[in-house]
Image: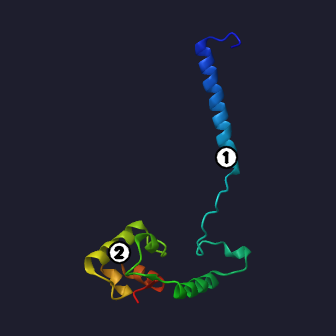
Amino acid sequence: MLGFTKKETIVIFFLVAGFICGTGIQFIQKRTLSLPEPVNAMTVNTGSVGMDEQMLMDTNEKLSSVFKVHLNTASSDILQQVPGFGPVTAKKIVRYRDENGPFQSVEELIHIKGIGPKTVEKTKNYLTVK
Protein backbone atom coordinates (compact mmCIF):
# COMPACT_ATOMS: atom_id res chain seq x y z
CA MET A 1 0.00 0.00 0.00
CA LEU A 2 1.93 2.99 -1.33
CA GLY A 3 5.26 1.65 -0.05
CA PHE A 4 4.42 1.82 3.66
CA THR A 5 5.49 -0.92 6.04
CA LYS A 6 2.87 -2.90 7.92
CA LYS A 7 3.47 -0.89 11.15
CA GLU A 8 3.24 2.42 9.27
CA THR A 9 -0.02 1.32 7.64
CA ILE A 10 -1.48 0.46 11.06
CA VAL A 11 -0.44 3.84 12.49
CA ILE A 12 -1.93 5.68 9.50
CA PHE A 13 -5.14 3.64 9.82
CA PHE A 14 -5.56 4.60 13.50
CA LEU A 15 -4.76 8.26 12.83
CA VAL A 16 -7.37 8.42 10.07
CA ALA A 17 -9.91 6.52 12.21
CA GLY A 18 -9.32 8.92 15.12
CA PHE A 19 -9.76 11.92 12.83
CA ILE A 20 -13.03 10.56 11.45
CA CYS A 21 -14.36 9.77 14.94
CA GLY A 22 -13.43 13.25 16.20
CA THR A 23 -15.09 14.91 13.24
CA GLY A 24 -18.24 12.81 13.76
CA ILE A 25 -18.39 13.74 17.44
CA GLN A 26 -18.05 17.45 16.65
CA PHE A 27 -20.79 17.17 14.04
CA ILE A 28 -23.13 15.43 16.48
CA GLN A 29 -22.43 17.99 19.22
CA LYS A 30 -23.25 20.88 16.90
CA ARG A 31 -26.48 19.23 15.73
CA THR A 32 -27.72 18.20 19.19
CA LEU A 33 -30.36 20.47 20.68
CA SER A 34 -29.40 21.82 24.06
CA LEU A 35 -32.20 22.50 26.49
CA PRO A 36 -32.20 25.87 28.24
CA GLU A 37 -31.53 25.98 31.96
CA PRO A 38 -34.68 26.02 34.11
CA VAL A 39 -35.69 29.50 35.20
CA ASN A 40 -36.23 30.20 38.86
CA ALA A 41 -38.90 32.86 39.26
CA MET A 42 -36.97 34.46 42.09
CA THR A 43 -33.83 35.00 39.98
CA VAL A 44 -35.45 36.35 36.82
CA ASN A 45 -34.30 39.81 35.81
CA THR A 46 -37.74 41.36 35.74
CA GLY A 47 -36.68 44.85 34.70
CA SER A 48 -36.73 44.08 31.00
CA VAL A 49 -40.14 42.41 31.05
CA GLY A 50 -41.93 45.00 33.11
CA MET A 51 -42.90 42.60 35.91
CA ASP A 52 -41.90 43.26 39.47
CA GLU A 53 -40.76 40.70 42.02
CA GLN A 54 -43.98 41.02 44.04
CA MET A 55 -46.02 40.05 40.98
CA LEU A 56 -43.86 36.95 40.52
CA MET A 57 -44.27 36.05 44.18
CA ASP A 58 -48.06 36.49 43.94
CA THR A 59 -48.14 34.20 40.89
CA ASN A 60 -45.98 31.67 42.73
CA GLU A 61 -48.38 31.71 45.69
CA LYS A 62 -51.39 31.23 43.41
CA LEU A 63 -49.73 28.24 41.76
CA SER A 64 -48.78 26.76 45.13
CA SER A 65 -52.41 26.91 46.22
CA VAL A 66 -53.41 24.83 43.18
CA PHE A 67 -50.45 22.44 42.93
CA LYS A 68 -49.45 21.03 46.30
CA VAL A 69 -47.16 18.14 47.14
CA HIS A 70 -48.73 15.55 49.44
CA LEU A 71 -46.26 14.91 52.27
CA ASN A 72 -47.62 11.42 52.98
CA THR A 73 -47.35 10.05 49.45
CA ALA A 74 -44.64 12.05 47.65
CA SER A 75 -41.40 10.35 46.69
CA SER A 76 -38.01 11.88 47.40
CA ASP A 77 -37.80 13.05 43.77
CA ILE A 78 -41.13 14.87 44.02
CA LEU A 79 -40.23 16.46 47.36
CA GLN A 80 -37.07 17.88 45.79
CA GLN A 81 -39.26 20.01 43.52
CA VAL A 82 -40.43 22.01 46.53
CA PRO A 83 -38.37 25.20 46.89
CA GLY A 84 -36.15 24.75 49.94
CA PHE A 85 -35.93 20.94 49.79
CA GLY A 86 -32.81 19.38 48.37
CA PRO A 87 -31.98 15.68 48.01
CA VAL A 88 -30.83 15.28 51.62
CA THR A 89 -33.90 16.97 53.13
CA ALA A 90 -36.25 15.04 50.86
CA LYS A 91 -34.70 11.74 51.95
CA LYS A 92 -34.98 12.77 55.61
CA ILE A 93 -38.70 13.50 55.13
CA VAL A 94 -39.33 10.11 53.52
CA ARG A 95 -37.31 8.34 56.24
CA TYR A 96 -39.20 10.19 59.00
CA ARG A 97 -42.52 9.28 57.38
CA ASP A 98 -41.50 5.62 57.06
CA GLU A 99 -40.41 5.45 60.71
CA ASN A 100 -43.18 7.55 62.31
CA GLY A 101 -46.19 7.07 60.07
CA PRO A 102 -48.08 9.68 58.06
CA PHE A 103 -47.77 13.37 58.83
CA GLN A 104 -50.73 14.88 60.65
CA SER A 105 -49.77 18.44 59.67
CA VAL A 106 -47.16 20.25 57.58
CA GLU A 107 -45.82 21.84 60.77
CA GLU A 108 -44.76 18.36 61.94
CA LEU A 109 -41.75 18.76 59.61
CA ILE A 110 -40.09 20.71 62.42
CA HIS A 111 -39.39 17.39 64.16
CA ILE A 112 -36.94 16.45 61.39
CA LYS A 113 -33.33 17.37 62.11
CA GLY A 114 -32.24 20.15 59.78
CA ILE A 115 -35.72 21.55 59.19
CA GLY A 116 -36.48 24.60 61.27
CA PRO A 117 -39.33 27.08 61.58
CA LYS A 118 -38.07 29.18 58.66
CA THR A 119 -38.04 26.19 56.30
CA VAL A 120 -41.51 25.11 57.42
CA GLU A 121 -42.81 28.64 56.87
CA LYS A 122 -41.15 28.87 53.45
CA THR A 123 -42.46 25.51 52.22
CA LYS A 124 -45.89 25.17 53.84
CA ASN A 125 -47.70 26.76 50.88
CA TYR A 126 -46.37 24.00 48.62
CA LEU A 127 -47.32 21.08 50.87
CA THR A 128 -50.44 19.31 52.09
CA VAL A 129 -51.33 16.30 54.21
CA LYS A 130 -55.02 16.20 53.21
Question: Quick check: can you spot residue 114?
Answer: no
Picture layout, residue 65 above or below residue 94: below
Residue of label 1: 28
Q: What residue did someone put label 2 on? A: 93
Outermost front residue: 1
Q: Is residue 9 above or below residue 95?
A: above
Q: Quadrant of residue 55?
A: bottom right
Q: Position of residue 13 (x, y in %)?
A: 63, 23
> Which residue type carries mark 2?
Ile
Q: Which mark is residue 88?
A: none
Q: CA distance from mark 2 to mark 1?
A: 42 Å
Q: Is residue 91 visible?
A: yes
The residue that appears at 69% across and 9% down in the rendered structure is 3
Question: Residue visible at 41% across and 79% down?
Answer: 119
Label 1 Cα neighbours within 10 Å, binned few <14 / some 14-19 / many ≥20: few
Q: Of helix, strand and loop, which one carries label 1?
A: helix
- Ranked by sequence position, the earlier of labels 2 and 1 is 1
